[in-house]
Amino acid sequence: MRDMADRDNEWDVQPAPSRVVAIGDLHGDVRAFGAIGRACGLVDEDGGWTGGSAHVVLMGDLMGGDDSRLLIHAVMRLEREARGAGGRVHTLIGNYDLLPVLGRLRRLTRKERRSYGKNDFRKDGPYSEWLRSRPTIVKIGSTVFVHAGLGRRVLETGPGEVNAQVRAWIAYDQGVGPKPPGETRWTVDENYGPMWTRAFKARGGRLNPGPSKKAMREILDGLGAERMVLGHAPTRTGIVTEHPHYGDSVVMVDTSISDDRRGRLGALVIERGALATVYAEDRADGEALREREKREAGRPPAFFARLRQAVARLFGGRRA
């Protein structure tokens, strides 16, 4: 894993690649991920990377569904494959992704909880360092991507420093780092932080308390961006490229992908500066990806942890 400081300096990707694809909150739906990836030409039927130099932004919240472990394995593999082909997969952190670190496993599904060990995301667990490596904010070309939203404080702190501060708090909660300064706590605040805020969720054209239109323009100008793309707040009509309050300055891409009945399998595509939407028709198109990850992931790490503990007890506490 490359040095974290290098990653914090990578929040601004320039020049913009010719194609960027943003996919909203997946909540463990690895089949939907495969179906959307195929519809966008990013993966083949078996889930191998075919996106070339494209950049993909996953908007966070991989956790929160039965197959989140399989989804994580698919994403980790595709991050490597994309980079090898000249592309990138940017996996943002969402609020659900922090739940295992915070010990709030009850908010995950029962099947999901059984697939992980207690410390899989803490200490030196198999997903611990990878979680810390993920960005909170990334800008590609003139578009800023963040799970829930940003206010004026990002201009005072700077996106790269926000990424670093979130990493520091995750490391602290994982038990592998010192407690960060209290004044940085806002970056992981569960009401107003960039992974938690509901300020951008519009209801009937009215906005929850959030930045004014003028403030939003100042935030974007300060970041050198034209628009902000968000997940976190589900929409009712698919991807919204014209926010009811902010207009084309804010794009909402959480289409409730994991909801079998009401969700839409959507992606936002930015190609040479132009915005378009792509929708997969059937999550069954991603079944092969799910089967691949089931084969490759094997038994969950929790199994081996329990096995080592059982052997240790059997032999009187000696190390297995």
Image (cartoon, rainbow, N blue to C red):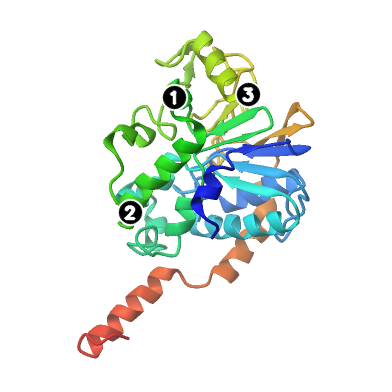
Amino acid identity at mark 2: Gly
Q: Is residue 105 visible?
A: no
Amino acid identity at mark 3: Ala
Residue 164 picture location, percent across and down:
44, 42
In the image, taking residue 275 as reference, residue 63 lies left or right, namely: left
| 266 or 268, nearer to the observer | 268
Point out the image quarter for the N terminus: bottom right
Q: Is residue 227 visible?
A: yes
Q: For label 1, count other residues whose C-alpha is less than 10 Å away and answer few (under 14), some (14-19) or many (20+).
A: few
In the image, taking residue 238 as reference, residue 154 lies left or right, namely: left
Per the image, the residue denoted by label 3 is 225
Q: For label 3, count other residues whose C-alpha is less than 10 Å away and answer few (under 14), some (14-19) or many (20+).
A: some
Does dot 3 land on a helix, a strand or a loop?
Answer: loop
Q: Are marks 2 and 3 in contact (CB under 8 Å)?
A: no
Identify the residue at horizontal 50%, vertical 12% (top origin): 215
Residue 93 picture location, percent across and down:
48, 43
Q: Reply above or below: 233 against 55.
A: above
Mark 2 to mark 3: distance in Å?
33 Å
Identify the residue at horizontal 49%, vertical 29% (top origin): 233
Can you tell which mark lies on residue 177?
A: 2
Per the image, the residue denoted by label 1 is 156
Q: Residue furthest left?
A: 316
Q: Nearer the viewer, mark 1 or mark 3?
A: 1
Quarter of the rendering containing residue 311: bottom left
Identify the residue at horizontal 45%, vertical 22% (top origin): 151
Amino acid identity at mark 1: Glu
Does dot 1 land on a helix, a strand or a loop?
Answer: helix
Say whether disc 2 or disc 1 marks the residue closer to the N-terminus. 1
How many callouts does the rendering have? 3
Q: Reply above or below: 236 against 246.
A: below
Quarter of the rendering containing residue 236: top right
